[in-house]
Amino acid sequence: MDFRELVLTRRTVHNYHSDPVPDSLVEESMRLSLWAPNHRLTFPWVYTVVGAEARAKLADLAVELKSRRGAEKMSEARVKAVRDSVLMPSHLISLAIKRGKDENQLHEDYATLACSVQIMSMYLCQHGVASKWSTGGFGVDDKTYGILGLNPAEVSLEGVLLVGRAQVTPDRTERPDLSQFLRRV
């Protein structure tokens, strides 16, 4: 698949089979991600591959957070769906960046993390593996720092990357024409 086709093919996947993805493939995606543009070469990445015990705690936290948002008690089916969203993907990788000296540095480091996630996602897609960067909820909750053994004074959680075999790959959503965004001066 050429690069253009890869860009047009990659999708964010929400539901996964429990089929394992080789650790070596996931690790290679992370290794390649370190080649993302990185202003001042701060190397801010903190990737945590979440194991079964910690993932179970994060699934419980995800259910707790979703339960708080609803006015009614969540059905058993909804609880299962929330838990499965955390437990079913082959890999769950917490994404964090080291805290910089100032707000500008944090902004630049977040930008390199975003580029890194795109590299991982593209590499995985090229190998038939789906992914999703989830930037809220349990992935950034205060309790997650403790579950993962991270110090919030040292790192900033920026979400999780779900990696696995897609149950359903979403259809391609058409994008607006470049002319709507491009200016020339």
Image: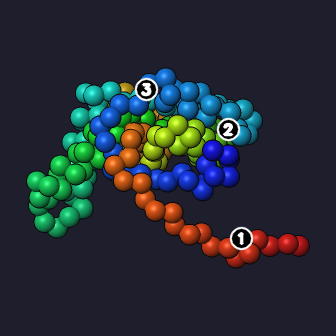
Residue 127: which numbered mark, if any?
none
**Residue found 17% across the figure and 49% down from its top:** 80
Say left or right for 87 vs 9. Answer: left
Q: Is residue 5 above or below residue 31?
A: below
Query: What's the CA distance linking mark 2 and mark 3?
Result: 23 Å
Q: Which residue lies under the disc numbered 3? A: 22
Query: What's the CA distance linking mark 1 and mark 3?
Result: 38 Å
Q: Position of residue 183 (x, y in %)?
A: 80, 73
Secondary structure beneath label 3: loop
Query: What's the CA distance linking mark 2 and mark 1?
Result: 24 Å
The mark lying in front, picked from 2 and 1, is 1
Give neighbour class at mark 3: few <14, some 14-19, many 20+ (Cα, 10 Å).
few
The mark lying in front, picked from 1 and 3, is 3
Q: Earlier in the sequence, mark 1 or mark 3?
A: 3
Say which amino acid is labelled 1: Leu
Say which amino acid is labelled 2: Ala
Res 103 visible:
no
Number of numbered discs: 3
Q: Position of residue 46 (x, y in %)?
A: 52, 31
Q: Earlier in the sequence, mark 2 or mark 1?
A: 2
| Quadrant into which the N terminus falls | top right
Q: Which residue lies under the disc numbered 1? A: 178
Q: Which residue lies under the disc numbered 2? A: 36
Q: Is residue 106 above or below residue 8?
A: above
Secondary structure beneath label 2: loop
Q: Is residue 80 above or below residue 173?
A: above
**Residue found 49% across the figure and 30% down from its top:** 26
| Direction top: furthest residue | 24
Secondary structure beneath label 1: helix
Say which amino acid is labelled 3: Pro
